[in-house]
Image (cartoon, coloured by chain):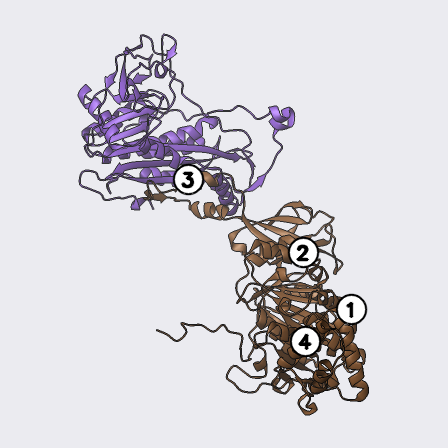
Amino acid sequence: MKLYKKEGNILQILSFSNENAEKGDYLLVEDPEARKAIIAQVIDVQFASIPGVLEELLRTLPDGGVPIQGEDIDPLEIAPHITYIQDASLLVCKIRATLENERLSPSSSWLPSRSQSTIKKLSVPMLLKLANVEGNRPIILGGTKDSSLLTIDATAVDGTLNIITGKKGCGKSHLSKLLMVSLIGYKATVVIFDLNGEYSSIGMTTDGKRNMHYHKIHALTPSQNFKVALEQLHLNVVMGILIHALHLPGTSAREFRRIWKTLQDKGNLTLSALGEAIRNLNCNQHVRDALTSRYHALVNSGFFTDNLAEATLLDESLLKSKDEGGAIIINLRNTSTIDRQILVEYVLGKLVDSLQSWKLKAVFLFAEEAHLYLRETYWDDIVTRMRHFGIFTTFITNQPDTIRESIYRQADNIFLFNFTNEHDLDVVSRASRVDAETVRSIARDLPPHHCLTLGKVVQDFPIVARVRTLDVKTMGETRLFFTGKN
Amino acid sequence: MIEQYTITTTPKYNFPQPTIDTTLPQRFLEQSIQSLKQVQPQRLQLNQQPFQQYHNYEQQPSHLRLNHTPITLKPNHQETTIAAVDTSTIKIGETATGIIIAIRGATTWKQNRQYHYTRLGPFIFHITEENKNEVYNTLEKAYFNTYYNSNRQASPHLTQMPTRLASLLERWLQTMLAKTVSHGLILFDGSLTSGTFDTPVQRMKEILSLSRRNKSIVLAFSKMTSLRVNGYLITEQLPKHEPPYLLETTGLRFKSPMIPLGDVYVARLNKANYAFRLDIDRENPLQQRMTAVEQLLGNDLHMQGYPETLRLSHILCTFTANEVLAIKHFITRKHGIQIINRPDMHRLLFGPFGRGEIYS
């Protein structure tokens, strides 16, 4: 390989077919005299502009659709040299860092010698070692192209905002399961908003046996094993549900607050008492109607109960997870949009409560397709206010434009799977820890199950890896009509 | 490799036959390798100026006349094999003692409505003042052992060596076609004027004789000509007549030692406004010559009035910039020649005006 050009932080390197450099590979451009080296990543592979190639191709073109039959008597065997030159490629590389005295700096301001520099591939383990991507809580994400493992440290996702995004069916949920399982392995508390009910079996192996995580998985299905008593609810949480999920107007909300406090003072905070109080409320008919309709929405959700014995599971699960780690999976499958919003409002309110009162230290929240249940104001809330309470969110989506731009800007880590749509790539490239060229060039060509990891976990050295397989029972597979049919 | 130079086709046309004497290409290879061995410890300065082609400009014949009455042609579609030959040479660079050149030849033929080709080379030579005589004479001897050994010409100047060696290869390829093509048309690039260093009379006569023996006719197309009548180029005095047609010239005589072996015509073969000087072996009767051109019209494509078979020969033997790079790569890798980049004095002294002479 030979250094050809440097423009800004882009290097162009001439490479030959036997050197096998591909998109995503890292190269070390060492200038022995300057005693410095540039670490650059290949973001595009192009044909080198070799003079005469067009003429060469033109004369091999078919004649009227039939190739010209011929024989080349090439006694000196020049032909392999022609092919060698013709197949030369130009590696467009992004400078990631400068290595000087075994220390990395993000500088790209110096120019290595074109004639003296040596260029060699930098293996991922070597890169990770140089970048200090190590720790005592390793999470093996998968294998890289050079058959080494991409290992990140769990502490690098602690306190961070993460996004897992990519086209449908490319392995996003698989990666989120991998992260989740790894985190609970380090005794972390993980809460998952499981939109398709695909995380419930994470405690089982592919052949249906219990795995080591079985006892740490708490699958909560609303209105079945996950109910809540009004008595357990904080007024703020209920108001949140009524105002944000059920869109209760301000006047009615004030009346509701009054009713709630009256019932609370009487020690009679039950569904039936609430219904009775609304019915007997002496107020404007519109206000009563508004309260009545919201009351019925709460009752019909099946999520609220007056039986305290039925309503302890979330608290229990959080308590269990606190010391030994665990995953609380909120199964949102088969729930209506309104019920989903009620549930999410409740769970988030409950988490904030628990964190504020130090019942919990911190929670890793995994939210799949959050736009389907997260209200507008929560986006900023999650990345700013709730983060300070200790809720560290990972958004998982196949529609990157449903996540607000401010989220991308503040994302610490992005796990990017294949996208071919320019619009999707544009959206993702707005993330502040990502450069647009890398995203556009590498993500477009990622094979299924390969993920471009960007951000803090890899010390801002984007790395492509094939996500490793997990021995857990998958539930997220699409049901097909033709499966099993001849 | 050379022994595999055998293509079996119809009984009418066997190209080339196993009996072909492959001594010359073998000597080309031997001399190529031998000469490159001598360059090993040296450094190579890449070619900076366009390669200067030494054209043997013909003397202006006296008494040349052009008959402006066109000989109308009618395409004859009777299946006829058309074969053509061309060679190419390029200077790759200079060493302290000489030059490194590459030579390649190509023959193409159209048969059963399909084009076929055979390319021979590239042969790469390191020519120095010391080895030029040996290289040239060895190759001459390999080809003309029987007739010309005793009458060997003085070896050419170093700068003329590329074209001389290419001419040797071209004559050999022409001989091979003349020996192997029967009842066909053989197209040469250039004229049938002989008597120059590159076109010895005896050698040219032998080629034409061989082709006549095989009932083939040689047609030589010149892309450029210097022949003028009344001060105007003969190819620019076209009558208002529907092509295809030929214009006949008469009175073509050169001063010794140059001898025209063909009769010269101006050929306008299609509606494209281009005409070419066409030399046809004058030993063939007039009717046969006309039939030959009509068979060419009926059997070959003509882009801009130039036969496609000959055009392909030229295209296939021409060195592309990519190939030149590959040859440099070859001599660097296989023969350990270090490429150096001396400053180009033309550019250094004259800046944008120092591009050197441009040769077509």
- Between tags 4 and 1, which lies in front? 4
Quadrant for residue A203, please give it: bottom right
* Image mark 2: chain: A
Spatial CA distance of label 1 from label 3 is: 64 Å
Query: In what element is the residue under mark 4?
Result: helix
Q: Would residue A467 appear left or right of B28 to someone viewing this image?
A: right
Instruction: Give the residue number, with chain letter if any, for mark 2.
Output: A430
Along the viewing direction, whichever of B48 and A462 lies nearer the viewer: A462
Going from N to C along the chain, the mark reached first, 1 or 3, is: 3
Front residue of A469 and A228: A228
Answer left or right for A1 relative to B31: right
- Amino acid type at image mark 4: Arg
Count neighbours of disc 1 (C-alpha within 10 A) and say few if under 14, some if 14 to 19, many if 20 or more: few
**Is disc 1 in the same subunit as disc 3?**
yes
Q: Chain of mark 3?
A: A
2 vs 3, front mark: 2
Q: CA distance from mark 4 to mark 2?
A: 40 Å
Residue assigned mark 4: A294
Task: Kindly give the residue lying farthest to the bottom in the view shown.
Answer: A309
* Mark 2 in CB contact with mark 3 (< 8 angstroms): no
Q: Secondary structure at mark 1?
A: helix
* Picture quadrant where residue B123 is located: top left
Chain ID for brown: A
At label 2, which amino acid type do we have?
Answer: Arg
Which residue was labeled with disc 3? Answer: A58
Look at chain B in the picture and name its colour: purple
Q: Nearer the viewer, residue A211 or A46?
A: A211
Please name the residue that numbered disc 1 is placed on. A385
